[in-house]
Image (tube, helix red, strand yellow):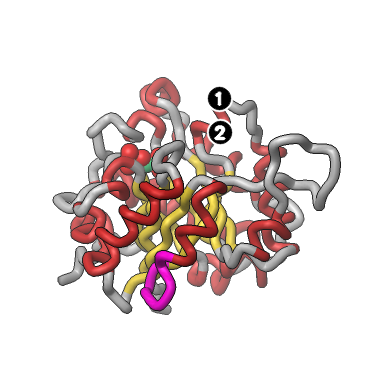
Amino acid sequence: MSRKKIVAGNWKMNMTPSEAVALIETLKPLVANDEVDVVFCVPAIDIIPAQEAAKGTNIQIGAENLYFEEKGAYTGEISPAMLVDAGVKYVIIGHSERREYFAETNETVNKKVKKAFEHGLTPIICCGESLTQREQGITIDWIRQQIKIAFLDVTAEQAKTAVVAYEPIWAIGTGKTATSDQAEEVCAAIRACIGEIYDEATAAAIRIQYGGSVNGGNAAELFAKPDIDGGLVGGASLKPDFGAIVNYNK
Ligand code: PGA
């Protein structure tokens, strides 16, 4: 089965609304590539102006987080219905920065994943090991646990449409990219784990990204691996280099 590549930018806590519009104007012509799904996951306050700026282009606007309740007394949170109403289709869930600084756990990730699906949003579910875990040789066990909990009570039909982002924590924002073989090894293990939880068809359908210092120079080699279906890109998504990543096949 052939899976469409998906390249998503993760803007993190960067770009004011007016800066967001200017950046989209700059990147618009550089990210035109119909063979790839192109998503800009932006801060919540940038979503609406970003949608407006991206109108008529191949850019889809995504979010960086959501809350797992429908509505109510959760000061400061963004509900799935708010994202849907703002035209969002993709939402990053469980990024390692959210796990580290905002106390997200495998369990809250699972709640958010289920809530996203309930509202027809496609979650980009993040997983990844620390350097210590890699050195201890427990990377695959750790990732399998993250995946198994993230997908608890998620149906096969939902899982088929999910995106998983494998992001080794030691490679994020460090300029230290995993080698394409290291990235492929874990992405293949994630696909095998999905196959165990569900079945071969689900494993074959789900899209798995690599993230961690992806740039225009390394994207083609990473995305050529059989189990890597694109990338989740932080730093380089704020620069013209993002165009080179999206057009890795040109
Ligand atoms: P990076 O970030 O590309 O800057 O390493 C990736 C991410 O955190 O999603």
Residue 194 is covered by the magenta coloring: no
Q: Is residue 212 visible?
A: no
Left or right: 10, with 192 as reference point: left
Q: What amino acid type is highlighted by mark number 2?
A: Arg
Residue 173 horizontal/vertical position (percent): 32, 33
Q: Which residues are magenta?
A: 53-59
Residue 110 horizontal/vertical position (percent): 69, 46
Left or right: 71, with 243 as reference point: right
Seen at 43% across and 27% down, the residue is 130
Q: What amino acid type is highlighted by mark number 1?
A: Tyr
Front one among 126 and 58: 58
Q: Which residue is mark 1?
A: 101
Seen at 70% across and 40% down, the residue is 77
Q: Which residue is mark 2?
A: 98
Q: How crowded is the residue under tag 1: few (<14 C-alpha within 10 Å), some, or many (20+)?
A: few
Left or right: 228, with 215 as reference point: right
Q: Is residue 25 visible?
A: yes
Q: How far apart, in angstroms, are the residues tagged by discs 1 and 2?
A: 5 Å
Front one among 95 and 202: 95
Q: How crowded is the residue under tag 2: few (<14 C-alpha within 10 Å), some, or many (20+)?
A: some
Residue 202 horizontal/vertical position (percent): 57, 69
Q: Image height check: is 19 above or below 134?
A: below
Seen at 18% across and 53% down, the residue is 216
Left or right: 39, with 26 as reference point: right
